Image (tube, rainbow, N blue to C red):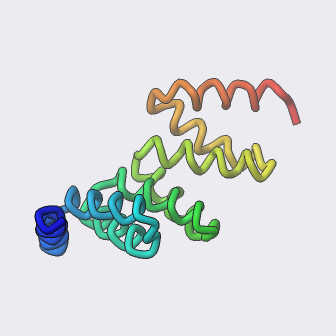
């Protein structure tokens, strides 16, 4: 529909001007429509513009697209920057790969940030022994 296209073009234009929220919105729209390449690009723009949550979403999209090394790198950087969701993502990937030891630092960070789920998983891993 014409109105919808006009709205998308306006959001895209605002994204191009450096507004992180608009880029994240476009990324979400692209992701839902199946265009993962454009979605990742827009999440990267939003991330660069300071929207750390978009960085975590970019990492998840990278992981889901099979770019596991890139995803871990992105999530690790964002986790270090203080985004608990990225820490939890990173930990879950390590656990999924049966690497609980690698998951512990990310879980500690997320737990320290008040993410109860991270605290529970951390406790379970630490109590399960080597």
Tell me: residue 36, above or below residue 99. Answer: below
Tell me: residue 68, above or below residue 124. Answer: below
Is 73 in front, or is 42?
42
Which residue is drawn at the image coordinates 40% and 52% (left, top)?
81
Tell me: residue 39, above or below residue 54. Answer: below
Q: Is residue 102 shown left or right of residue 64?
A: right
The answer to whether residue 18 shows anywhere in this view is no
Q: Is residue 109 shown left or right of residue 56?
A: right
Picture coordinates of residue 59, whole percent (x, y)? 50, 60
Q: Quadrant of the C terminus?
A: top right
The answer to whether residue 130 shows anywhere in this view is yes
Picture coordinates of residue 76, whole percent (x, y)? 53, 57
Which residue is drawn at the image coordinates 57% and 70% (left, top)?
70
Q: Is residue 42 shown left or right of residue 75?
A: left
Picture coordinates of residue 99, whole percent (x, y)? 78, 49
Is 3 in front, or is 115?
3
Which residue is drawn at the image coordinates 60% and 38% (left, top)?
107
Q: Quadrant of the N terminus?
A: bottom left
Is 7 in front, or is 18?
7
């Amino acid at each position: 529909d014409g109105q919808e296209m006009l709205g998308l073009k306006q959001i895209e234009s605002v994204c191009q001007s450096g507004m992180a929220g608009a880029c994240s919105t476009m990324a979400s729209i692209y992701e839902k429509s199946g265009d993962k390449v454009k979605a990742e690009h827009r999440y990267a723009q939003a991330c660069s513009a300071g929207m750390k949550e978009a960085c975590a979403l970019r990492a998840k999209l990278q992981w889901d697209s099979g770019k596991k090394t890139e995803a871990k790198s992105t999530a690790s950087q964002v986790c270090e920057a203080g985004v608990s969701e990225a820490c939890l993502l990173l930990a879950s990937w390590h656990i999924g790969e049966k690497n609980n030891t690698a998951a512990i630092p990310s879980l500690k960070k997320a737990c320290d940030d008040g993410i109860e789920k991270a605290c529970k998983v951390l406790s379970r891993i630490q109590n399960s022994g080597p």
